[in-house]
Image (cartoon, rainbow, N blue to C red):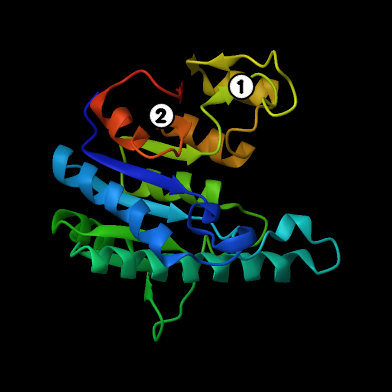
Amino acid sequence: MKYKRILLKLSGEALEGQEGFGINFDKAVEVCREIKEVKEKFNTEIAIVVGGGNFWRGRDNTYMDRTDSDRIGMLATVMNAIVLKNAFKRLNVKAKVQSAIEMNRVVELYTKDKTMDYLKEGNIVIFAGGTNNPFFSTDTGSSLRAAEIEADAILKATDVDGVFDKDPDEYDDAKMYKEITYDEVIVQNLKVMDLTAITMCRDNNIPIRVFNKEKGNLEKVLSGEDIGTTVK
């Protein structure tokens, strides 16, 4: 299937520096170089949601107020989005950052109309700040933005090869699905995206493609190769 417009979900860990923390700018440039190449090759409009786990993982912090902890995580995604914008700039790619959190002296506030204009002008748009609500993950932010911009699919680049019936790091006999329905993901409580995100994708008929973030796989997905797992 040829995708006219995609929402690419990247983890913050894709940009992390030494010892699994912070930013490695060279690594960010390599991630953006691959995105640039597929955009040019397939003439695809690309929006990105990036996580903040390389700076902060609020769900692992049991000492802070959950709302405040989630706010820190949202700010981490803004930092990562700014890094990505600068990495694209290094590669002479037009990119814009839009945040759900109003901080006009730092990044632009998200509006759908502006996003659509940017995409049509050939910009890559990087969404930051989650949904500007605590208790909602960047997965939910991805599904929300994908629905708003009418993306053909969410492409989720992860550390594993696809969606498994159980954790492949813990079980040698874990089975990977090539295709699975939204409802099967919900019933089996598979850790693809959180429940809110899966439900929103189902209700808006947005397929999710989960694949390993290894270099070259994004091009394979857009080329139609049979890698990863499709949730639809």
Q: Residue 164 has which mark?
A: 1
Task: Tell me which corner region of the image, top left, top right, bottom left or bottom right, holds residue 217.
Answer: top left
Element type where label 2 sits in the image = loop
Q: Residue 11 has which mark?
A: none
Instruction: Identify the amino acid type marked 1.
Output: Phe
Q: Tell me which residue sits at (23%, 42%) in the image.
A: 38
Task: Tell me which corner region of the image, top left, top right, bottom left or bottom right, holds residue 85.
Answer: bottom left
Quarter holding the C terminus?
top left
Q: Tell me which residue sits at (62%, 53%) in the image.
A: 136
Q: Residues within 10 Å of mark 1 (few under 14, many from 20)?
A: some
On the image, the x and y values in percent for residue 135 come to 67, 56
Instruction: Identify the amino acid type marked 2.
Output: Pro
Q: Tell me which residue sits at (43%, 53%) in the image.
A: 49
Q: Residue 207 has which mark?
A: 2
Separation of marks 1 and 2 at Cα, in angstroms: 17 Å
On the image, the x and y values in percent for residue 95 come to 26, 64
Element type where label 1 sits in the image = strand
